[in-house]
Image (spheres, grey):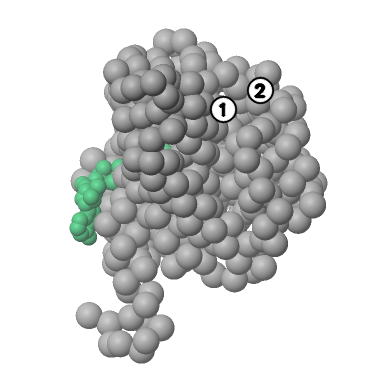
Amino acid sequence: MSDTRYLDWPFLDERHRSLARALDAWALGNAAHGHGPDVDAECRALVRSLGTAGWLRHAVGGVEFGGAGDALDTRALCLIRETLARHSGLADFAFAMQGLGSGAISLAGTPAQKQRYLTRVARGEAIAAFALSEPDAGSDVGAMACAGRVDGADVVIDGQKTWISNGGIADFYVTFVRTGEAAGARGISAFIVDADTPGFEVAERIEVIAPHPLARLRFTNCRVPLAQRVGAAGEGFKVAMRTLDVFRTSVAAAALGFARRALEEALARATQRRMFGQTLADFQLTQAKLAQMATTIDSAALLVYRAAWLRDQGQSITREAAMAKMVATEGAQKVIDDAVQIFGGLGVVSGHPVERLYREIRSLRIYEGATEVQQLIIGRDLLKAFGAPRT
Ligand SMILES: Cc1cc2nc3c(=O)[nH]c(=O)nc-3n(C[C@H](O)[C@H](O)[C@H](O)COP(=O)(O)OP(=O)(O)OC[C@H]3O[C@@H](n4cnc5c(N)ncnc54)[C@H](O)[C@@H]3O)c2cc1C
């Protein structure tokens, strides 16, 4: 573990510090930065090993359902994502999706749903996915068209979801559909759809710059028992937003992990690379760059752990989570770009750690709310607090 002074910050408790140190030691031996071409197999293996080692207990809430605590511990989630991202983007992804995919069940599921799904998620025996986005409803979630029609004791789902992480390898998908109790966001409900449900299919796999399982899903006359609904009818949008409030902060933490790794790589390279009779690190231009990178990382870390700490105190963190995600993801992109610059030609060689980081970070500025969406959330919240009339 490199610079760990931030672990002494007052946002964290002793149990968080020991968790971060133990995970770092585990990740050194079990989560390599590079991975082979078969991301499906690697993700399945990572989920199993994260489950066996006990780390996935932190991805679910409820001790009686396999969780590490009775509620999701946002600071633990963030420290785990930050640490895994520093070692391996795919390991972070595998952990994060177990949490995001089952998050709605942790927050709003029935005891029976928790027993059936969370226990297996925590052991790494079931892979979870979160299906909200659609081809015509990404940033504008309220434009969702995938429809759920109640028929007796079932809901019948027809439509599509896209950009679904773990699509193709998940055992179940928490799927948000328009059930029409009211107009717009108040007419959406969440259902757990098992991957073997008739009428559910993976319509297309999607290849992205930092490979991980991703797919477009199709639902055709897909019949799911109403008992699979998570939260009340018409409350699906609220359930999605509550889930995203937790996991958005953890996306920021993952960005932080990528940025920390980039800085570590840059420091190692700058102090070793000789040029003009000295090392690259001896030049003040390089020191200025390293200083900016470190300051960007610490600013992001303060926002991440403030948001996580506030949520763990039971406070609403919509504004703070948005600030953390915006600053950490945008800042990490710049830090990683600076690291690539410090490496020169080596920084763009396929498979080099900083080249991988350069690809890994990009989509974090888009998913779980693009940066522009975070700006809107912050701006609206400021105006609301100021008492400005809603437009
Ligand atoms: C790698 C990856 C994994 C993903 N995993 C999942 C998943 O597991 N589950 C899931 O449900 N979804 C997932 N998504 C989808 C993701 O949440 C959406 O891509 C995201 O919400 C943006 O939607 P969109 O792609 O349709 O872009 P659009 O909604 O078309 O937005 C395009 C761009 O418009 C800009 N923009 C948006 N709103 C505004 C505004 N109000 N004003 C000005 N500019 C604006 C932003 O720059 C944005 O990037 C994933 C996406 C990616 C890339």
Q: At 42% from the left edge and 24% from the top edge, which residue is drawn?
A: 278
Q: Quadrant of residue 290?
A: top left
Identify the mark at residue 28; answer none if there is no mark: 2
* Residue occupying the point 43% across, 51% down: 296
Residue at label 1?
A: 87
Judge: label 1 CB < 8 Å from ligand 1: no
Query: Which image quarter is the N terminus in?
Result: top right
Q: Which residue is nearer to you in this view: 387 or 122?
A: 387
Q: Position of residue 12 (x, y in %)?
A: 70, 56
Tell me, yes or no, whether the two marked residues, 2 and 1, touch with CB atoms within 8 Å. Answer: yes
Residue 133 spot, x, y in % from top left: 33, 44
For mark 2, give the secondary structure. Answer: helix
Query: What distance separates the C-alpha of mark 2 from that of mark 1?
Result: 7 Å
Identify residue type, mark 2: Leu
| Residue 285 percent coordinates (x, y) | 34, 40
Where residue 276 appears, x then y in whole percent? 34, 22
Query: Looking at the image, can residue 259 be seen?
Result: yes
Left or right of 287 in this view: 73 = right
For residue 164, above or below residue 37: below
| Residue at 70% over, 33% down | 23
Residue 261 lies, with reference to residue 150, above or below; the image says above
The C terminus - image quarter: bottom left
Identify the mark nearer the N-term, 2 or 1: 2
Q: Residue furthest front?
A: 277
Q: Using a 10 Å C-alpha cutoff, classify the residue at mark 2 as few (fewer than 14 neighbours), some (14 to 19) or many (20 or more).
A: some
Compared across the picture, whether 35 is left or right of 285 comes to right
Q: Is residue 266 visible?
A: no
Identified by mark 1, the residue type is His
Q: Secondary structure at mark 1?
A: helix
**Image check: 107 left or right of 69?**
left
- In the depicted view, which residue is nearer to us: 55 or 13? 13
